[in-house]
Image (tube, rainbow, N blue to C red):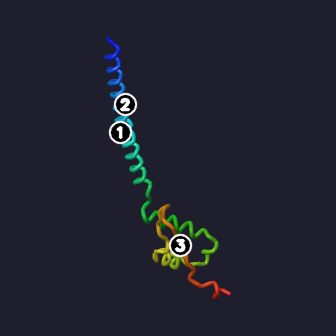
């Protein structure tokens, strides 16, 4: 076998190897992405579970011990708590101006 033919075969083998590695990597990435999506779907709690957990956490605060359960349910039903993502900005405004708090 001459050097030119050997060089051609080496280039061809390297090209095949690179193509197979690329296909394998893409398939592996797709499987990983599908697995993460499946985990995300199973991780999300139902609205009832979220509300129950939030209510239990709120009821443990000493500040809220004197508030009736009905009042807490009214507040929670009033959509005062909103689910937000990490990318969203939150701006808070005071309901009472600072000058009237003295």
How far is the residue under mark 3 from the one under mark 2? 51 Å
Give the number of the disc on residue 91.
3
Helix, strand or loop at mark 3: loop
- In the foreground, 41 or 54: 41
Residue 6 at x, y percent in the picture: 34, 16
Residue drawn at the location 57% of the way across and 80% of the way down: 94
- In the foreground, 30 or 52: 30
Could you tell which of marks 1 and 2 lies nearer the N-terminus? 2
Q: For the residues carrying marks 3 and 2, which lies nearer the camera in this image?
A: 2
Vertical arrangement, residue 24 with respect to residue 84, above or below? above
Helix, strand or loop at mark 1: helix
Give the number of the disc on residue 18.
2
For residue 7, what is the image quadrant? Answer: top left
Residue on which the image places disc 1 = 27
Q: For the residues carrying marks 1 and 2, which lies nearer the camera in this image?
A: 2
Residue 54 at x, y percent in the picture: 52, 66
Q: Quadrant of the N terminus?
A: top left
Residue drawn at the location 49% of the way across and 71% of the way down: 81
Q: Within 10 angstroms of label 3, few (less than 14), some, or many (20 or more) residues?
A: few
Q: Quadrant of the C terminus?
A: bottom right
Q: Within 10 angstroms of label 1, few (less than 14), some, or many (20 or more) residues?
A: few
How far is the residue under mark 1 from the one under mark 3? 43 Å
Residue 35 at x, y percent in the picture: 40, 46
Could you tell which of marks 1 and 3 lies nearer the N-terminus? 1
How far is the residue under mark 1 from the one under mark 2? 14 Å
């Amino acid at each position: 076998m001459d050097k030119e033919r050997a060089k051609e075969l080496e280039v061809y083998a390297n090209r095949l190897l690179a193509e197979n590695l690329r296909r394998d990597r893409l398939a592996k990435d797709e499987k990983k992405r599908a697995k993460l999506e499946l985990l995300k779907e199973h991780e999300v709690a139902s609205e009832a579970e979220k509300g129950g957990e939030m209510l239990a956490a709120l009821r443990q605060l000493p500040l809220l011990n004197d508030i009736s359960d009905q009042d807490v349910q009214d507040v929670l039903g009033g959509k005062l708590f909103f689910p937000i993502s990490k990318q969203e900005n939150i701006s808070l405004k005071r309901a009472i101006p600072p000058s009237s708090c003295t």
